[in-house]
Image (cartoon, grey):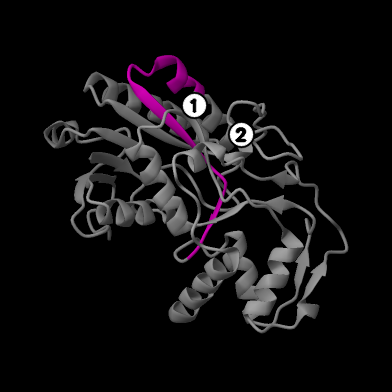
Amino acid sequence: MKIFVTGATGFIGRAFCAEAIRRGHRLLALTRDPAAQIAADVEVAIGSLSETPWDQVTRFAPEAALHLAWIAEPGVYLKSPENEVWLEQSKAWFRKLMELGVPYLAGTGTCIEYAPSTEPLNEEQSPLAPQFPYSKAKAALCEWLRGHATGDWAWFRIFYPYGPGEHANRVCTSLLTSLRTGRPLALRTPDSVKDYLYIDDLAEALCVAMEGRHTGAINIGSGRGVAIRDLAALMAELTNASPQLVRQAAELAHDSSPVTVADMRRLKQAGWCPKTSLKDGLQHLIDSLLVTA
């Protein structure tokens, strides 16, 4: 399949491109950086959502498009006013792809589009209630695709990816860095339960969903929740750090989504399930941090 992809130089994008090439797909990657390091055999299109080289896209003749690019800097992206800009530019980008007749369009959303729940989150049954500019913009783009797509479309709601190459301030790398340097972890939301998915499994799930031309909203997670205190304890074990470094903060923080776990029945019915255990995935991340230290 010929796939036009944005965000190819990001954490998820790099993994997706490597997996898609491995599976025999042809890729055209939109990037603003002429020196971007993308997987071998990927054709590069220099530009942005608002300045896409459409002549090159037309020549490539994509059979599918995957939109991964978005503001994603930890500590910034949730409340940034740029989310509204990304929303409008994304609509225009998808609209142009429709005009070109691209038959399958896929966007990427977030698990925090859902309303808080103590049950696994289901694409059809769980209500949406985005609370941040980021999740509101993502949910709005999904609804826009639902109402305007002229062909097949998919919306991948991604839960909590982790693994080598992630931003240093993402939860897993940040906690591991503290433990490896002997600094205590004061957990402000120790009982929050999240669904962590290893980055290579996420890339495979995206490929499986696109190859099967699955449509509508689709969860991409592991289907398994882990409490933050248990995640930190496992990290301490894997780094040979003292378990005494993991503690509950004196002042706890409110988590607006204290249990966030995916109902993964849709992709499991398509034959996909994650291959990497949390323990193995964290070990891969630790090994990558040792290499780059």
Q: Quadrant of residue 149?
A: top left
Q: Is residue 48 magenta?
A: no
Q: Amino acid at mark 2?
A: Glu
Which residue lies at the image location 46% right of the left edge and 51% below the top edge? Answer: 202
Q: Residue furthest left?
A: 59
Task: Report crowding for label 2: few under 14, some 14 to 19, many 20 or more residues within 10 A (C-alpha).
Answer: many
Q: Splitting the image into 4 quarters, where does residue 103 fall?
A: top left
The kind of residue on which mark 1 rests is Cys
**Secondary element at tag 2:** helix
Label annotation for residue 155: none
Residue 158 is a magenta residue: yes
Residue 143, image x, y percentages:
51, 21
Image point (67%, 26%), residue name? 127
**Numbered circle sitting on residue 113:** 2
Say if 145 sits above or below 155 in the image.
above
Residue in the picture at 26% in, 59% down: 39
Q: CA distance from mark 2 to mark 1?
A: 10 Å
The segment highlighted magenta reads: 143-163
- Secondary structure under tag 1 reads helix
Residue on which disc 1 sits: 142
